[in-house]
Amino acid sequence: MQIQFLGAAGEVTGSKYLIHTSLEESSCKFLVDYGMFQGAREADEKNQKLLPLHPEEISFLVLTHAHIDHCGLIPRLCAEGFKGPIYCTTTTAKLLEIMLLDSAHIQVSDFERAERKNKLGKWRGDMPVLLYDTKQAIESLNQVKAIPYAKKFSPTPSIEVTFEEAGHILGSSIAVIDVKEKNEASKRLVFSGDLGMFEKPIFRQPSLIESADVLIVESTYGDRLHRNIKETENELVEIVTQTLERGGNVIMPAFAVGRTQEILFILADLIRRERLPHLNVWVDSPMATKVTELTTACMDELDDDAKLLYQWLLDHKNKIDVRFVGDVEESKSLNRLKSGAIIISSSGMCQAGRILHHLINNLPFEKNAIVITGFQALRTLGRRLVDEAVSVKIMGEYVDVKASIHTLGGLSAHADRDNLLKWLKGFKQKPKHVFVVHGEPSASVHFVQSIRETLNWNDVIIPTLQSTFDIS
Ligand SMILES: [Zn+2]
């Protein structure tokens, strides 16, 4: 057996792994995840790189979850000739449709805008890359096969796969893959996918896996500890109470998938526990609206606290008003709200989308508060706000920053170092091969060091991009 690291090796995006096997029935190649590289300029180039084999030679694909850096290139793979099934959990299948159609839509509109400008001679630099269009995204969804959590299935007679809870986002899974090669003992491959915190609101805890021959584990925050959720709640109570008392609005840029639902949960829970008064909340992001609907439709996959809270909300509808904003006109009408509003909108890093209007309207006034709820990459508007800019450029205009800016540190979709180690302790003995992926180099290196010190696992590998390993 061989495993090749085609992404998320020395970086956090582009997750994809190619596994070659020699089975009794045939030789079989399959993929785990097929994500998009994001962020850096070289991402475009890497996203266009062809696989080291024809996609038609791949038998099937196992998908851990529907974040774009794990699934975002699937339509391109299918358009290039991959005909096999795409296995994922039932909820990932639903979320995948929302994510891939949104990704195609963004790419097509960016491309068309650039083309229009280019024709007028107004476009500078490289043209944006169109990796796939909406039709290709829809076609790829026809290959999806949804499988419930914890149900063993066989893509081919000598391979068995089970999806276990990863506690990261809706539908997220750990992929446990048992492979029986010709004349060999069966080997278990465990792909952690992205793991959530054990105490994360809404989601169930990541499942502990007891054994593996080959383990591929993420390390996004392998070098740091998150602030605890209680401190985060206290901070939020203070910000919301003070801002509403002084007659301001609270603006929260938030990722549409996961973070928006988590914030809604925390606000509702704080009201239930009488730590916050009745609130008027607007969720202004079509994608966040769709994902929130999906979340409430999948309550049985959430943790017990989330289920109890949801029931409490249904019984106490007068305690919180949450409005989901539809079209752009309705979104713009929120500009008239001068006080008492909590507006959750995207994009989470303030780079595009409806959040921009809310920032233009609310940043220039001291009474308002902007609450940053997630990671802000370098050179994003969100990062400039965190870095205390006194004035920022939004849609070509300079806007004074008078509102107070707060960062909530305790919300993260990813496990921190101690939570990753806690998950690793679930293995009864050290897996024979351990690969640390999905981390910036320093996060992965520090995490490997912690693994060595805490678990005494010595030969842990950080694979480089494109590297291949023989698994004996
Ligand atoms: Zn993820």
Image: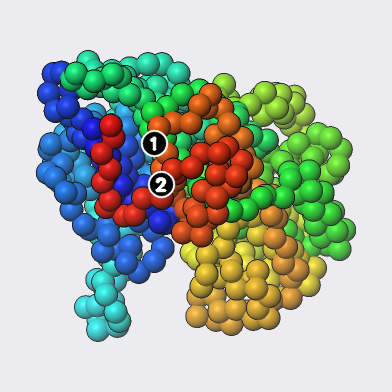
Q: Tell me: residue 398, above or below residue 307.
A: below
Residue 361 screen position, x and y as percent: 65, 69
Q: Which of the image's four quarters has the C terminus?
A: top left
Indicate whether 168 appears above or below 364: above
Q: Which residue occupies 65% across, 78% down? A: 389
Residue pointed to by mark 2: 461
Circle on res. 110: none
Q: Residue at x 21, y 57 (%)?
A: 49
Residue 372: x and y in percent read 65, 59
Q: Which colour scheme is used?
A: rainbow
Q: Name the residue under label 1.
A: 433
Is residue 92 shown to the viewer in this render?
A: no
Give x and y (percent) for residue 417: 61, 46
Q: In the displayed structure, does residue 228 sit left or right of residue 130?
A: right
Q: How crowded is mark 2: few (under 14 residues within 10 Å), some or many (20 or more)?
A: some
Quarter-of-image position of residue 370: bottom right
Q: Position of residue 420 (x, y in %)?
A: 57, 40
Residue closest to the eye, 303 or 419: 419
Q: Is mark 1 on a helix, strand or loop?
A: strand
The kind of residue tagged 2 is Ile
Which residue sits at x=33%, y=51%? 7
Q: At label 1, which amino acid type do we have?
A: His
Q: Identify the residue shown where x is 19% and y is 49%.
A: 51
Quarter holding residue 183: top left
Q: What element carries label 2?
A: strand
The answer to whether residue 403 is seen in the rendering is yes
Q: Do the residues labelled 2 and 1 touch (CB within 8 Å)?
A: yes
Residue 119 occupies which quadrant of the picture? bottom left
